[in-house]
Image (cartoon, helix red, strand yellow):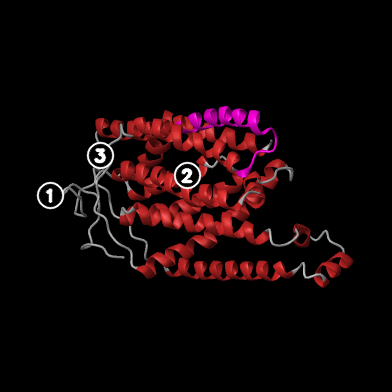
Amino acid sequence: MTQPNPSPSNDAPQPDASSSAQQPQLTPTPQQPSRDWWFVAYRRFALIGAALAVMIALWIGGNILASEAAHQFFGGNQPTWMSLLTSSGPMYLIAIPLSMLIFTLVPAVKTRQYTLKGGEFAQLLIMCVPVMMLGNLIGQLMAAVASQGQASDRVQQLLVGGDVWAVALFAGVLAPIFEEWIFRKEIISRLRRYGEKTAIVFSALAFALFHLNIYQFFYAFGLGLILGYVYTRTSRLWYVIVMHMFINFLGGVIGPAVIRLIDPRVLNGTLSESEVARMAAGGQLNGLAVVSLYYLAMLALCVAGIVLLVRWRNRWEFYTAPEELPAGLKIRTAYANPGVIVYMLLTLALTFWMLLQ
């Protein structure tokens, strides 16, 4: 990764008026921050939390109205594109634009943009695979425990049973663009002045809670950490959008498309031996070879990702921010404020409500 001369901050004020960008330079961290400085930081985190809470409230409200309108036209047999439109449309067209009115109350930090070498980008991308798979496994287990085995992953059901082109558009293209814009660019650019790690973890947690789905929470949080790191180190939004697209296409488009090639009873073991033999004789199990290749490829990527995560353990770079929060104030400032508390309570309540439906 291309970096300037080592120094502890990559968003400190630019000493030279010849450029509007900001570059790393030594900036002393306040040892005993004044009450006014801390109150400003506390207020800014609260505003970001409030913006997120407003975004969720507008999204859910718009989704309810849109779903009711769609039901009047399509009844109980809505096409996939309509289900995705009623779910995502209110978010993209109403919730995000209006929440930006609050986001902009917190000034963004201007930073230089840096490039990633192709090999580094590929390695970071592969690291996402084991994080996604492990997070998905934890989410499945937690959902089973919380619902006593009664819950089902509705998102996965929609992906597997829905129209592949509609899923590719909404999950593979639109979601990465809008979600990376909000959870990486808007949040990290506004909070990184208080600490790179603080901003990355905050954005990852906000991103995970935003999904309102315990099945997705853990892998969304893990992926959010990697995506947040990439954005913090490069300040280039398109890197994380492309990574997010790859992840969503891999798990939300390619995976379900491969699974649809075979009878699901083959996977869950409910077919009798005679039925399996009859399907094999008729050539109906050819898709099983494709499914096997897909899972082998995912396993290979998972192993490679784990190896890379181990090899990179000492390569993660973090610089001290110009207004770095002292260790004793980080949690209190970032999470113990009214805006973030409301956002967390709202999203957690909706997550468990949807789990039990």
Magenta stretch: includes residue 75: yes
Other-residue count near label 1 (Cα within 10 Å), few / some / many at <14 / 14–19 / ≥20: few
Q: Which residue is mark 1?
A: 15
Ranked by sequence position, the earlier of labels 3 and 2 is 3
In whole angstroms, how far apart are the C-alphas of marks 2 and 1?
A: 34 Å
User: Which of the two residues, 245 or 169, is positioned nearer the viewer here?
Assistant: 169
Residue type pointed to by label 1: Pro
Compared to residue 105, the image places residue 319 above or below, namely below
Q: Position of residue 13 (x, y in %)?
A: 18, 47
From the viewer's perspective, tell me whether residue 355 is left or right of residue 108: right
Q: Which residue is mark 3?
A: 32
Q: Which residue is mark 2?
A: 207
Other-residue count near label 2 (Cα within 10 Å), few / some / many at <14 / 14–19 / ≥20: many
Residue 315 falls in image quadrant: bottom left
- Element assignment for label 1: loop
Q: Which residue is at 70% across, 67% downward?
A: 287
User: Which of the two residues, 258 or 196, is positioned nearer the viewer here?
Assistant: 258
Q: Which residue is at 39% across, 49% downward?
A: 200
Foreground tag (3 vs 1): 1
Q: Position of residue 322 (x, y in %)?
A: 24, 46
In whole angstroms, how far apart are the C-alphas of marks 3 and 1?
A: 24 Å
From the viewer's perspective, tell me whether residue 234 is left or right of residue 287: left
- Element assignment for label 3: loop
Foreground tag (3 vs 2): 2
Other-residue count near label 3 (Cα within 10 Å), few / some / many at <14 / 14–19 / ≥20: few
The image quadrant where one finds the C terminus is top right
Residue type pointed to by label 3: Gln
Q: Which residues are magenta?
A: 55-80
